Amino acid sequence: MSNDQLPLTPFLRWAGGKRWILPHLEEVFPCSFETYYEPFLGGGAVFFYLQPEHSVISDANAELVNTYKAIRNNWKRVVWYLKSHQANHSDSYYYEVRAQTPSGRYQRAARFIYLNRTCYNGLYRVNLRGEFNVPRGSKNQVLFPDDNFEAIAAALSDAKILHADFESLIEKAGKGDLVYLDPPYTINHANNSFIKYNDVLFSWEDQVRLRDAATNAVARGAIVLISNAFHESIVDLYSGHFQLNEINRYSAISGQSKGRQLGKELLIVGTKN
């Protein structure tokens, strides 16, 4: 982030979001880089912190990608639909909107943000038919006084936003580029229900494929930063060619504050020697 840029807060609540990791990343961010690549965009905390001049960002979630594109292209129209959601919000209205599948880009984006801000714990979960099925949460606010969709749109204005597999994006990174990877946390022999759910979306085989893609990017001269679970299987996966840094954080997966405990994660750094 340059000195003339103001920090931007992500507009989505996102399980596994990385606002908390920014102080740790500051210690390993390069002073300068060419193009920024992030294939697991999610809530975009790192992207909005850096606000890179040149970037290629993507996610496997098509509705999320559509939302970013819609805000970039016409944020005022998205906000217009959000105002309608705010005016009509109720228990019954939430489930009515959840059951809908709007066809327009901006209606879809506003629906995505509305559900994200009013669903249980900001989770994104779909059933086997691909239907969003998270119940209504306790939040009633759809629009906030500090929302700055105009600045969000400006930060996205020069970004190339893709709906793509992570490997195809990482393959584009080369000398002088910065790659940040924040995959779903799936580990071998996990008994955590959230990780089990993510394993459907991102298997252990995908973790291995990610490691190989990251290794190849480093060999091409890219700087690669990876957030992942602090677990023996992940340590073994990246040992030997990457620098492994143990960092502490409070888990935010639990719906109750008493269930949010101090835990460990890995910040993995890869640079060409």
Image (cartoon, rainbow, N blue to C red):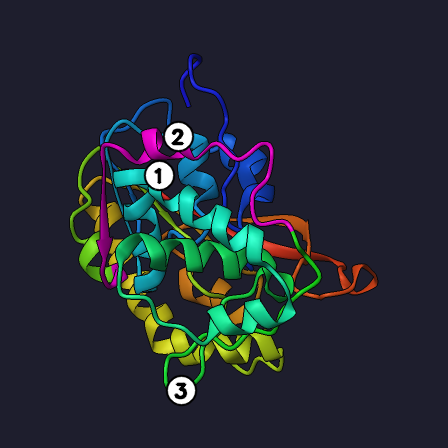
Task: Name the residue: 76% across, 59% down.
Answer: 261
Identify the residue under disc 1. 75
Question: Which residue is at the front of the view, 122 or 79?
Answer: 79
Please say whether residue 238 is visible from this viewpoint: yes
The residue located at (22%, 61%) in the rendering is 164
Marking on residue 128: 3
Q: Residue furthest bottom?
A: 128
Res 273 quadrant in image: top left
Going by the numbered disc 2, the residue's amino acid type is Glu
- Residue 227 relative to residue 32: left or right: right
Give the magenta range.
141-166
User: What is the x, y in percent for residue 198?
Assistant: 47, 74
Q: Which residue is mark 2?
A: 150
Side (left or right) of 218 relative to 12: left
Name the image quarter holding residue 144.
top right
Residue drawn where x is 27% and y is 47% of the image: 69
